[in-house]
Amino acid sequence: MKTVTRLTTLDEIKAARAALPDFVRRTPILPLARNSKEVGREKLFLKCENLQVTGAYKIRAACAVLRSLTGEERKRGVVVTSSGNFAQAYAYAGGRMGVPIVVVMLDSTSPYKVENTKGYGAEVVFCGSDALARQSVVDRVARERGMTSIDNWEYPPIVPGHASIGLEIVEDCPDVETVLVPVSSGGHAAGVAAAVKLSNPKVKVIGVQPKRANAAYVSMQKGTATAIDYWDSMADGLSARRPGEHPFSHLQEYMDEIVLISEQDIADAFRTILFRTKMLGEPAGVVAAAAFLSGKVDNARKTVATLTGGNVTEDMVQKMLAMSKG
């Protein structure tokens, strides 16, 4: 049974895209040939959000959120939670828009992303190891400091903010047949799926998750947003143990299916993307492409996969290269 919620409209998506500030980049879509024989005959293309201003796609939604606040709310500042890329996006956007930012992070968050977040000007508050408890810490800190608490899973402007990526895909690649997106709490996937399906219902939209980070997959099977009691993946940017109710309603409406990939698939995709396209992707960032490269989806269809981020440490790069099949 579908969650009862008001779905984002195409007009809202277009308005959110039109309101993006100049520092948000329109990223390219580049072909990926797995070998020299495929050059010029590629079926897989990458929407390169790793080239976005903060190294990942989330700056789009962060700007949409901050723009939705009142002047007084912006002055007081906001508190959010993030595993890294949203944190950096809020920190950068807040600095550019004059909004103080506090980010609640898990103790296990990549030090690279923590330092970048601080470098962009945000304050970081650590909250232990329970991902499902992060939002309660956000709410507490906001109350104590008189700031505005933002729930990145449920706040409505998140979906149209992310959806600008989907609009750019159908505009820049009008003959696309399949769009692949990673799924965590669901905001990115919901936005892209809504924008693509509302623009061209014939395009197939497929979500991708690691096998042991599969809350949205389980939720789609059960028909309701469901928490999983395990999580184990090097794709730390996909840390949600359940999808948000609001984005999940969009996944139910607009996503054709969700497929699962292995950690090996992630490492292999990282290597292929790095050496064939010269693009650096973080583990979560290459998950969508991994579904195509590992044969989990139809390789005969013209496919665009979102390369969502490239914020990765040297240690993780070495780990994935050592793990991958060269």
Image: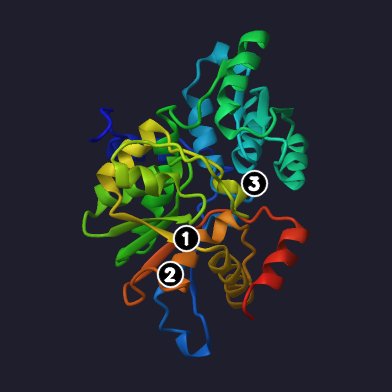
Does the residue at mark 1 contact the one at mark 2 (Cβ under 8 Å)? yes
**Res. 77 visible in picture:** yes
CA separation, marks 1 and 3? 20 Å
Q: Please state which of the two labelled residues, at mark 3 or mark 2, is closer to the viewer.
A: 2
Query: Residue 288 shows which numbered tag?
Result: 1
Q: Looking at the picture, how far across and down is residue 185, in whole percent?
A: 47, 40
The disc placed on residue 83 is none
**In the orientation shown, which residue stands out farthest toward the front?**
229
Residue at 28% in and 28% down = 5
Q: Earlier in the sequence, mark 3 or mark 2?
A: 3
Say if 281 sits above or below 199 in the image.
below
- Quickly name the residue at label 2: 292
Amino acid type, mark 2: Phe
Under mark 3, the amino acid is Thr
Q: Quadrant of residue 181?
A: bottom left
Alpha-carbon neighbours of circle 2 within 10 Å: few (<14), some, or many (≥20)? many
Q: Which residue in the protein does label 3 denote?
A: 54
Q: CA distance from mark 3 to mark 2?
A: 26 Å
